[in-house]
Amino acid sequence: MFGATSQLYDAREPEFKAVVLTMSDNDMYPLTERNNMTKALLPIANKPMLWYILQWLEQGGILDIKIVTTRESEADISNYIEVYKGMSNITVKGLSEVSGSADALRQLAPQIKGDVIVVPCDLLIDVPAVHFLDLFRIRRPAMATMFYEVMRSEGGGGSSKARVPLPVVGIDQPTSRLVLLEDVESDEELQLPMSLIRRFPSMAVSDKMQDSHVYVLQKWLLDYIVNNTDIESLQDDLLPLLVSAQSDPELFESSKLEKYMLKASSEQDVTDDHDAAALQFELSESAAKPTDPTSSDSLQVFVYIRRGGIAGRADQIPQYCDLNYIATKLSIDPRVEESAELLKNVQVSADSMVGQSSKLGERCLVKRSVIGPHCIIGHNVKITNSVIMDHVTIGDNAVIESSILCKEATIPDGFQIINCEIGAKVSVFENSSLNKKTRTVDDYM
């Protein structure tokens, strides 16, 4: 059986359906190769990263959740959901072919009866979901999204330190509308149209914000996606279209967005007590939807900006390492599991974790690192700023620094691994050390 249903789940038609996207990507290689595990189950502070976004949704009152993945990963994620202890109705859907996030929504559209929130599986954020959703309820934009200020790196490990390019965003400060979204190369100058400046004179522009890939869409916008198959990605296709159409009447008209907005406006039936109360609040606060749905100004894209705090996606290996470090520091779980065995003079720092049934030999030192369950660590091993997944074996006197060791990897005695990714089931047997390298089983065949 795929999915799980809690006895606490309310079977009434939910206000929102959540769609969690869990497709793997090449930027996480070799962590996501088939020998290891699907991306959504990669451990962060010894919990699958999927756990964090499910908790975020549930704490925001979102109890109808659909997890979208590939056919190859469907069984693995379904098995995890069977043991996941939550309060929501969670189902897992494996898709054979999907060209992007909007295409995934298009395939799920018959099962979505109302507004939808789309989230990635790799997001950790401290903004309460209920706060973000309340702003959507009050303002009723066509689409709401969330951007965050990129956190300073904690010195994440791995062989790659490539900088993730960030877009230039413009936010109309009085209304929190996202009115500018441009990808600009570092050596390019950004030319702002005067029409945009005149229309939004209080626009704040920044190149320090990253898209969280959290999107809330009104139902009519989902209908628009269904009938416009050229829209494949929410981030790359739909969001730029909506942002530009807000201030470009010709684009608004040619995109035929007006047709769907008018239909949604005519079908709106405020009979539910909750909707009536929300509408009355909007009117009293002068935050109601624009009265003329035929103009481009009636189209609004709301953006929530998170500055400071905790916000990040594990979509690159250095960021994955950073989030492991942050989540470990904040975790209320035991630093060393009760079933773990630590021999004499083992030191485990307060910003590290040791998983269940792992064994650490004498004089081991673990700093700023996460050791997964069922690992065997030899004597006098030094592990710093690293992620060690489950069932890893490390020989005596080895040094592991700023690296990731995937499940069932084996490191020989006295070996040094610095700024590396070692794939699943790899038995390393080079001379004495590796630095800024990636190793998989194929490298030793």
Image (cartoon, grey):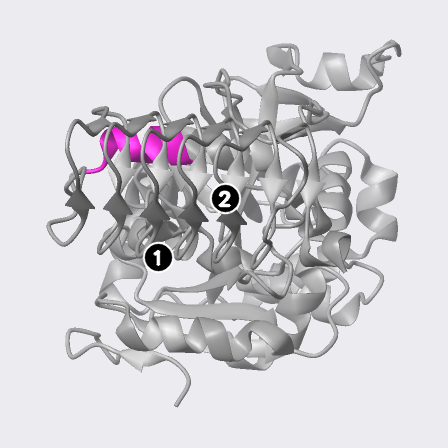
The answer to if 325 sits in the magenta stretch is: yes
Q: Residue at x 14, y 41 (%)?
A: 334
Where is residue 85? Give x, y as percent.
22, 67
Secondary structure beneath label 1: helix
Q: Specify which label sits upstream in the sequence, 1 or 2.
A: 1
From the image, which quarter does the C terminus lie in?
A: bottom right
When the figure is inspected, residue 134 is found, relative to residue 267, above or below; the finding is above
- Which image quadrant for residue 331? top left
Task: Return the residue nearer the eye: 11 or 282.
Answer: 11
Identify which amino acid the numbered label 2 is placed on: Lys
Q: Is residue 160 magenta?
A: no
Task: Identify the residue shown where x is 75% and y is 31%.
Answer: 247
Q: How far from the left and from the top, in percent, is residue 399? A: 47, 28
Q: Main secondary structure of the magenta part?
A: helix
Q: Secondary structure at mark 2?
A: loop
Q: Bin the neighbour count of mark 1 within 10 Å (Cα to Cα): few under 14, some 14-19, many 20 and up.
A: many
Residue bearing the label numbered 1: 54
Viewer-side residue, 110 vs 84? 84
Q: Residue furthest left?
A: 338
Q: Is residue 70 visible?
A: yes
Name the residue nearer the viewer: 138 or 240: 240
Mark whose residue sits in front, 1 or 2: 1
Left or right: where 387 falls relative to 245: left
- Which residues make up the magenta segment? 324-331
The numbered mark at residue 9 is none
Residue under circle 2?
289
Left or right of 383? Residue 160 is right
State the quadrant of the N terminus: bottom left
- Residue 152 image offset from top left, x and y in percent: 49, 15
- Using the numbered discs, state the Cα–Cα distance from disc 1 to disc 2 in whole angstroms: 31 Å
Q: Residues within 10 Å of mark 2 (few under 14, many from 20)?
A: some
Q: Amino acid at mark 1?
A: Leu
